[in-house]
Image (tube, rainbow, N blue to C red):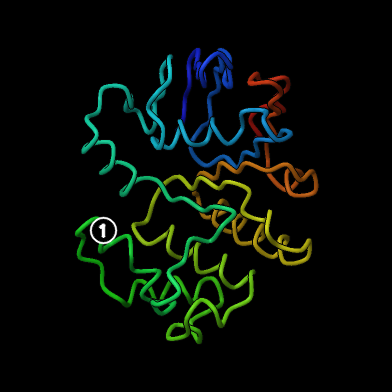
Amino acid sequence: MISTQNLQKKYGPDTVLDQVSIQIESGEFVAVVGASGSGKTTFLNVVGGLDRTYEGQITVNDQKLEGLSDKALAQKRNRELGFVFQQFNLLDHLSVLENVMLPAFFAAESIPQSRGLELLDQVGLKDKAQDRPPQLSGGQKQRVAIARALLSSPSILLCDEPTGSLDKETGLQIMSIFQELNESGMTVLLVTHEEHVAKLARRTIRFEAGKVISDSGTAP
């Protein structure tokens, strides 16, 4: 569950989030849509605990982010949230499997490699486990990034323009993975400027100039 109340964020004199109050229930698939500069990516970063300089209140899985220390917030991110970005952020000198296992290394968690292989199988790349990122296509790289985001079994997946660097057909294939994850019970919050991507979510929230201008509501 994600809840924001009167969320406000400024960059100098510019207001990029203006009194944003949103409730997202567990198991929803929500697309946040808007033009460049509308505040949608800033919203995702703030909700994901990547940016703490805001006013208002954010609750994620019944826990207020404002009351957490930096260490506690980092632990919450690692355990409860998965992140997928437009730029795949893979390390070229590591194998695909090693890239998937990176969150366990940084969080000092004991997660068996079999979990990484299981996730690569889930995204259709088990046979690429020992390849390196430069050998992969853009769509394959994003599949690796998704597998990495799922390593710690998060309850919420936060995606920032995950299809933005892909052609339309490949982007739709990536969206089908998010749909399958949502159908299995995962909450998916996806930021996009692409209407054909947004319509595949079950709920659409539109941002303009830092404000929510429309919300299709919670899907049944």
Place of residue 74 in the rendered image (x, y in percent of width and height, measured from the top left): 28, 42
Q: Is residue 49 above or below residue 137?
A: above
131 left or right of 73 in image? right
Q: Residue 84: x and y, percent?
A: 51, 53
**Residue 83 located left or right of residue 195:** left
Task: Name the one closer to the observer, 4 or 19.
Answer: 19
**To which residue does mark 1 refer?**
106
Depth order, front residue of 7/165:
165
- Nearest to the observer: residue 82 or residue 86: 86
Q: Residue at x 64, y 69 (%)?
A: 139
On the rendered structure, is 177 left or right of 114?
Answer: right
- Mark 1 closeness class: few <14, some 14–19, many ≥20 residues within 10 Å: few
The quarter of the displayed image where residue 105 is located: bottom left
Above or below, 24 against 183 in this view is: above
Q: Quadrant of the C terminus?
A: top right
Image point (58%, 36%), residue name: 41
In the image, 132 versus 202, the foreground residue is 132
Label 1 amino acid?
Answer: Phe
- Residue 181 point in image, percent of width and height: 54, 56
Q: How many marks?
A: 1
Q: Quadrant of the N terminus?
A: top left
Q: Secondary structure at mark 1?
A: helix
